[in-house]
């Protein structure tokens, strides 16, 4: 028998919650709102648009998108979550499961294990294809049996005598289909982490499973989402409207996150407050607790400056994921223009 990892209704419910849980940035729907000339022009966009990478590694990237509309920033966020493909375990063929975990729960846990496989190297599997091919399917085997170690003293606790008492992702073995063995290695397509706990077992318990991983998108199921999270926030702007010195300057510094307000020597020997970096401001509004400070500071957000953060699950680095999201958005635009020209 085989199990898919979740019902479609559960998947749709998950995405409704995920999309509604974040307040989306808004922008004017027409030029001239609030006295600002925001008429879109290609030449103006090319001149003003910039991407500045703040930090970047194989799992996480933070960068600034400057001079862009809120709708584009949010479109890229949503595409990263739900429309950039990845590989995940879709079908679990259960030949034997005597562990305490039910087949359906075990299949769901296996589906959430992130895989290293590059989805760009695979095709989408056809809906009516039950077996899959080397172009669209990766096959794995999970075959583990828990036994007692005869070399351990009989009076020892059972937990100290178990062999394979814990089943980890390192026990998942890749079974190449067709010529896959010539194109990939187990390190290229297997689980990203070897120490993810799948199940606990007692002596006599056994798992014998075949797993099929396919290409999919987060819109169909959250397990296909290639990011742990992708989010943005507007860049804060903090302006001091008057000089703040002495004890008041120290109080003002404590009202903000570390690194936002600094102290420098004033002309009269007192410490004077200055803005170091508004980037780290969390907009806590603690300054409004003090009557002598609340009118001395102006706190705003730059309307077209977005601090964007992408955290990858590990299959693809975050910069590649962002590039793939841009490709998806470009294809959507092409499709829309083709429909308009019909």
Image (cartoon, rainbow, N blue to C red):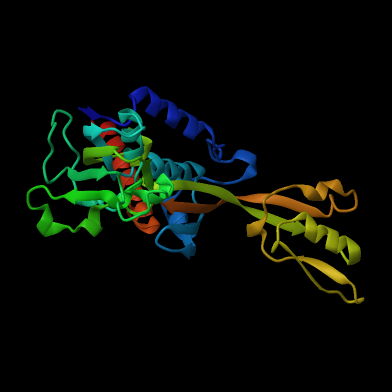
Residue 192 found in image quarter: bottom left
Q: Position of residue 134 (x, y in %)?
A: 12, 46
Q: Is residue 257 left or right of residue 32?
A: right
Q: Nearer the viewer, residue 257 or 166?
A: 166
Residue at the (90%, 67%) spot, across then down: 246
Q: Is residue 276 left or right of residue 57?
A: right
Q: Nearer the viewer, residue 87 or 166?
A: 166
Residue at the (34%, 25%) spot, across then down: 8
Can you name the residue that lies furthest to the right here?
268
Indicate whether 189 appears above or below 24: below
Residue at the (39%, 56%) spot, across then down: 318
Whether residue 193 is visible: no
Residue 272 found in image quarter: bottom right
Can you name the residue that lies furthest to the left here?
178
Residue at the (79%, 49%) spot, across then down: 286
Q: Nearer the viewer, residue 232 or 44?
A: 232
| Image quadrant where one finds the N terminus | top left
Q: Position of residue 139 (x, y in %)?
A: 18, 44
Whether residue 57 is visible: yes
């Amino acid at each position: 028998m085989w199990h898919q990892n979740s019902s479609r209704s559960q998947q749709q419910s998950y995405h409704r919650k995920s999309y509604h849980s974040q307040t989306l940035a808004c922008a004017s729907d027409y030029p001239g709102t609030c006295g600002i000339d925001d008429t879109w022009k290609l030449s103006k966009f090319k001149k003003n648009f910039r991407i500045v990478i703040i930090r970047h590694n194989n799992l996480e990237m933070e960068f600034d998108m400057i001079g862009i509309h809120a709708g584009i920033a949010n479109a890229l966020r949503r595409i990263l979550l739900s429309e950039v493909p990845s590989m995940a375990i879709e079908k679990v063929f259960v030949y034997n499961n005597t562990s305490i975990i039910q087949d359906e729960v075990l299949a769901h846990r296996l589906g959430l294990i992130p895989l290293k496989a590059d989805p760009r190297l695979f095709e989408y599997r056809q809906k009516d294809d039950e077996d899959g091919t080397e172009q669209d399917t990766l096959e794995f085997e999970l075959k583990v049996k828990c036994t007692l170690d005869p070399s351990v003293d009989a009076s020892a606790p059972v937990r100290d005598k178990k062999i394979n008492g814990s089943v980890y992702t390192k026990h998942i073995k890749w079974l190449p289909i067709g010529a896959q063995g010539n194109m990939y290695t187990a390190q290229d397509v297997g689980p990203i982490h070897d120490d993810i706990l799948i199940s606990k077992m007692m002596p006599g318990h056994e798992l014998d499973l075949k797993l099929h991983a396919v290409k999919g998108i987060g819109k169909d199921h959250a397990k296909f989402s290639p990011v742990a999270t992708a989010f943005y926030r507007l860049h804060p702007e903090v302006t001091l409207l008057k000089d703040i010195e002495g004890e008041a300057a120290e109080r003002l510094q404590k009202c903000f996150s570390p690194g936002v307000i600094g102290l420098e020597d004033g002309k009269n020997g007192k410490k004077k407050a200055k803005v170091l970096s508004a980037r780290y401001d969390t907009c806590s509004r603690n300054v409004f607790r003090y009557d002598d400070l609340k009118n001395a500071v102006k706190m705003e957000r730059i309307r077209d400056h977005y601090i964007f953060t992408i955290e990858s699950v590990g299959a693809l680095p975050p910069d590649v994921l962002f590039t793939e999201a841009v490709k998806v958005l470009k294809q959507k635009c092409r499709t829309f223009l083709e429909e308009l020209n019909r």
